[in-house]
Image (cartoon, grey):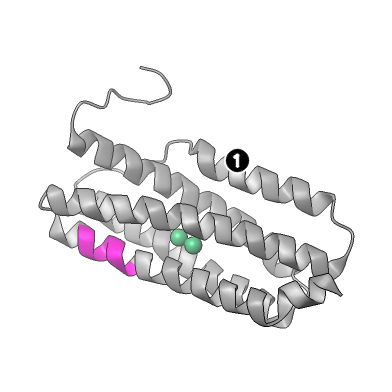
Amino acid sequence: MGLFSKPIKSLEDLFVHMLQDIYYAEQQIVKNLPTMVEKASNAQLKSAFSHHLSETQTHVKRLEKIFDLRGEAAKGVTCQAIDGILAEAKEVLSDCSDREVCDAAMLAAAQAVEHYEMTRYGTLIAFAEQLNQSEAARILGETLAEEKNADKTLTSIAESRVNRMAAE
Ligand SMILES: [Fe+2]
Ligand SMILES: [Fe+2]
């Protein structure tokens, strides 16, 4: 059975497994973002992290709504990918001594998180549509739009300020 809690025999099983994976991932992000809000020096970056923390709390609730629609208890399974991205971010930050360079490191880590979420939500939406679960697809789409928007905001903060400050 490998790493999975339950054998995955159908697209439906895989869909549920991936919902549990992203449910765990979103919860880890909720736990980690407050440290990023606290550590960010750049005001725009701080506020982007803080705004996305509140969005991420909504992402957790939306997933609970989907489990609820399915008549299942919300449950997470360890997502090694998000654990790896977050562990790597912590390691880089602990080695980083310059404020501005730390901002650039946190911003890069946050974009890795957003891209992970975007790929997962993209797949989940495609699976939900294939399985004729249009309400789940719609809810997942709301979150995907916010992940994309968070990523765009981070890109503009990086390009307009944070990378230049880190280079000085
Ligand atoms: Fe999210
Ligand atoms: Fe996100």
In the rendered view, would you say 130 is above or below 100?
Answer: above
In the rendered view, would you say 90 is above or below 160?
Answer: above
Q: Quadrant of ligand 1?
A: bottom left
Q: Which residue is mark 1?
A: 84
Compared across the picture, whether 21 is left or right of 95 comes to left
Compared across the picture, whether 57 is left or right of 101 comes to left
Asked whether the viewer can see residue 13, the reply is: yes
Q: Which residues are magenta?
A: 137-142
From the Cβ of disc 1, is ligand 2 less than 8 Å away? no
Which residue lies most toward the right here?
97
Q: Position of residue 106 (x, y in %)?
A: 69, 61
- Residue occupying the point 54% across, 55% down: 113
- Residue occupying the point 76% across, 45% down: 91
Asked whether the viewer can see residue 30, the reply is: no
Q: Position of residue 155 (x, y in %)?
A: 57, 73
In the structure shown, which secondary structural element does the residue marked by tag 1 occupy? helix
Does the magenta stretch mainly form a helix, a strand or a loop?
A: helix
Q: Position of residue 134 (x, y in %)?
A: 14, 59
Compared across the picture, whether 71 is left or right of 76 comes to left
Amino acid identity at mark 1: Gly
- Say if the magenta span includes residue 167: no
Number of numbered discs on residues: 1
